[in-house]
Image (spheres, rainbow, N blue to C red):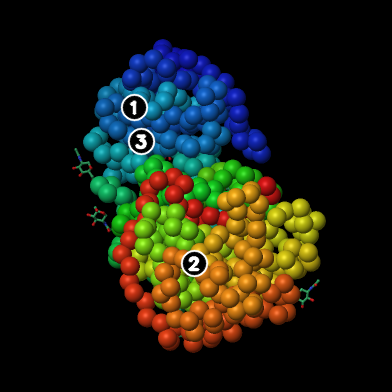
């Protein structure tokens, strides 16, 4: 119904843009905005009785109704009690938030509070009377804010969510899948102990079991500061048990130990968690082909890099993957790839168009900025460190090529995709990602795209479109040349505006044994001549125009281990200037046509 009988302030508006591919519910198409006054309240009087329990749900879709293309941020209150902060980085995101509360008077006020970050608005407001027997923990001074509610196993049906009228209280039962869960269901009706507090029958007719029979079922969430969490689990037996069998379940709530994080339990994050961990996207630390990377922190203090996929990436994904299942499968695959020379992948978020990939934060930024001296460090990497980094990268690539089943081709080896931790150990970023975006079966589609970064592109692959592990070997060779020369992959001449390929420039000079003529002056002549000439030789072999002449990563690892025996690294202490947009291009990747 119209909200006009519940509020006198505010202005009715129509949204200008809606999510293009989704049929938007009518309630999202109009909204009420509040340009005047700091606090505007709905008074739900005629329909509320003191002491009764209610579910209140507020809906939002900004939809650029004001033409400012700037989604606001504001607070929601129930009377004088804080409920939630609304914020959305995207104009076409549909958002709802839910709270269960007891009316302390014969009316409930739902207030929108202007916090100086844009004009508050609301698309819809729902009030549902609840049976006092459910969510018994709620009392006059204690409300329940919804964190998550899902019907496990529901993914076996490709149909919609369950809500009213199937759920008499209009609790919304969403679908949820986890990689370690197997969904199953029954067509038999389930019988109830207590109809009043159990979910609707269809929700109880599906369930999940662990993929690995000897594992427990895990579900995890972040422990936010001062919040108390109440967990409601519903069980129904869906299988015929033998005459002398019983099933016993022991729900266990176990906090993750710090450091035992999230790294062992990779998972899907909600958009709300992403907002919290990035402090509402406060600090951009890099920008690349896939989108912008933000600094973040997990509740346990773990520092993370949150890569928000750009709209272009998300659109490409939508075109590539019919629905989000395929994306999730690919991303779940990535969570199983572990090596000490790969940037640890922590998890991902996919809610509407808000798609994020979450990695461990690498304190020293990317190798490219260290080599070019653009990261604020005055001290250059010494030869010993460069050698160690070269071996780290080679080991990471070797693992992708031979240790992973199926084998992974990185496709975008470059110095900005190589990240350094606080101990200057190198880890490869963005592995496996291009697989998500490009499907080799679609030759016609793919041939229109530039797949890779200029200066690193394997010439044979460019001509034949036949992607092999040797394309990564070529990219690795270019990285070695950068470490030797301190030059970028495309060199701009300072006198004329000519551009030269590092490979075209350095290869002939090195091939005639005059390494000195191309050597990085920042090394200040401090290197071991034997290991330098060996690395130069490897670089030449890797950048051979014909892939058959390039060595495998396994052979390269063996050679580099040999070189390292003769070098000792000297630690340097330097922190790159982080926190400035653009100073670091870490986690970047260019895989799009330009
Ligand atoms: C309300 O519930 C909370 C949480 O269970 C409890 O700590 C508090 O004492 C309760 N207050 C009243 C007035 O019952
Ligand atoms: C389950 O219950 C519904 C509604 O009570 C009934 O229509 C249906 O026939 C039942 N199905 C089975 C398999 O018992
Ligand atoms: C509310 O709970 C009472 C007591 O458990 C029950 O008799 C009644 O049917 C419930 N109402 C609904 C709508 O489920
Ligand atoms: C299943 O879990 C057990 C215990 O954690 C483990 O030893 C086993 O390797 C797992 N099996 C698979 C196929 O992952
Ligand atoms: C339970 O059933 C199994 C398999 O039929 C049987 O071997 C076992 O003896 C039974 N145990 C009891 C306590 O009846
Ligand atoms: C959640 O965080 C709070 C505040 O940091 C802490 O006191 C509490 O022990 C944590 N709970 C768990 C289960 O880790
Ligand atoms: C692609 O390269 C692989 C490995 O070098 C080779 O076996 C295969 O024949 C090539 N395919 C095409 C279509 O050129």
x, y (%) of residue 262? 39, 63
Give the residue displayed 37% in from the left and 57% down from the top.
377
Mark 2 nearby-residue class (10 Å; few <14, some 14–19, many ≥20): some
Residue position for label 1: 115
Q: Is residue 98 above or below residue 288?
A: above
Q: Is residue 322 left or right of residue 131?
A: right
Tell me the mark number nearer the camera, choosing from 3 and 2: 2
Q: Is residue 568 left or right of residue 63?
A: left
Within 8 Å: ligand 1 and the Cβ of disc 3? no
Q: Is residue 552 above or below residue 95?
A: below
Viewer-proximal residue among 297 and 505: 505
Give the residue displayed 72% in from the left and 66% down from the top.
459
Question: Is residue 314 visible in this depiction of the protein?
Answer: yes
Tell me the mark number nearer the camera, choosing from 1 and 3: 1
x, y (%) of residue 69? 53, 28
Residue position for label 3: 84
Residue 424's quadrant in the figure?
Answer: bottom left
Give the residue displayed 39% in from the left and 15% down from the top.
36
Residue position for label 2: 520
Residue 572, numbered circle: none
- Count of numbered labels shown in the rendering: 3
Instruction: Give the mark nearest the N terminus, 3 or 2.
Output: 3
């Amino acid at each position: 119904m119209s909200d006009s009988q519940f509020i006198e302030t505010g202005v009715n508006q129509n949204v200008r843009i809606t999510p293009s591919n989704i049929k938007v519910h009518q309630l999202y198409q109009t909204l009420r905005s509040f340009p005047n006054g700091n606090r505007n309240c709905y008074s739900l009087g005629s329909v509320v009785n003191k002491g009764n329990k209610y579910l209140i749900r507020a809906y939002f879709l900004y939809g650029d109704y004001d033409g400012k293309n700037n989604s606001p941020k504001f607070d929601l209150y129930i009377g004088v009690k804080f409920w939630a902060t609304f914020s959305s980085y995207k104009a076409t995101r549909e958002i709802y938030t839910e709270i269960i509360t007891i009316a302390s008077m014969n009316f409930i006020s739902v207030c929108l509070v202007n916090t100086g970050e844009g004009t508050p608005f609301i698309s819809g407001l729902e009030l549902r009377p609840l049976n006092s027997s459910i969510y018994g923990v709620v009392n006059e001074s204690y409300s329940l804010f919804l964190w998550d509610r899902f019907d496990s196993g529901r993914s076996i049906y490709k149909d919609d969510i369950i809500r009213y009228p199937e759920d008499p209280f209009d609790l919304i039962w969403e679908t949820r899948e986890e990689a370690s869960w197997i969904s199953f269901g029954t067509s038999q009706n389930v019988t109830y102990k207590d109809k009043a507090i159990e979910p609707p029958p269809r929700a109880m007719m599906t369930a999940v079991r662990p993929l690995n029979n000897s594992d427990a079922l895990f579900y995890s969430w972040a422990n936010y500061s001062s919040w108390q969490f109440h967990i409601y689990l519903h069980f129904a037996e869906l299988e015929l048990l033998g005459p002398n069998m019983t099933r016993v379940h022991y729900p266990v709530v176990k906090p993750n130990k710090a450091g035992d994080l999230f790294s062992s339990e990779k998972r899907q994050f909600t958009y709300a968690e992403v907002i919290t961990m990035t402090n509402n996207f406060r600090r951009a630390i890099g920008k690349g082909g896939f989108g912008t990377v933000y600094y973040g922190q997990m509740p346990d203090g773990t520092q993370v890099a949150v890569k928000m996929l750009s709209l272009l990436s998300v659109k490409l994904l939508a075109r590539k993957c019919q629905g989000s299942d395929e994306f999730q499968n690919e991303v779940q695959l990535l969570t199983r790839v572990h090596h000490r020379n790969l940037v640890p992948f922590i998890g991902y978020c996919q809610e509407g168009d808000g798609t994020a990939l979450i990695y461990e934060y690498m304190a020293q930024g990317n190798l490219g900025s260290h080599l070019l001296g653009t990261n604020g460090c005055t001290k250059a990497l010494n030869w010993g460190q460069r050698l160690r980094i070269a071996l780290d990268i080679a080991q990471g690539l070797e693992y992708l090529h031979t240790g992973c089943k199926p084998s992974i081709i990185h496709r975008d080896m470059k110095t900005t995709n190589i990240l350094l931790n606080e101990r200057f150990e190198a880890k490869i970023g963005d592995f496996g990602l291009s697989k998500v975006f490009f499907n080799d079966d679609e030759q016609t589609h793919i041939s229109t795209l530039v797949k890779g970064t200029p200066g690193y592109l394997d010439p044979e692959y460019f001509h034949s479109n036949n992607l092999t592990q040797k394309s990564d070997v070529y990219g690795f060779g270019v990285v070695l040349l950068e470490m030797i020369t301190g030059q970028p992959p495309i060199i701009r001449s300072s006198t004329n505006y000519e551009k030269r390929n590092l490979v075209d420039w350095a290869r002939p000079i090195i091939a005639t044994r005059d390494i000195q003529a191309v050597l990085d002056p920042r090394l200040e002549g401090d290197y071991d001549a034997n290991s330098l000439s060996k690395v130069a030789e490897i670089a030449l072999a890797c950048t051979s125009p014909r892939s058959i002449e390039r060595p495998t990563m396994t052979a390269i690892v063996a050679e580099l281990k040999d070189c390292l025996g003769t070098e000792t690294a000297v630690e340097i202490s330097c922190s790159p200037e982080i926190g400035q947009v653009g100073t670091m291009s870490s986690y970047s990747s260019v895989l799009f046509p330009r």
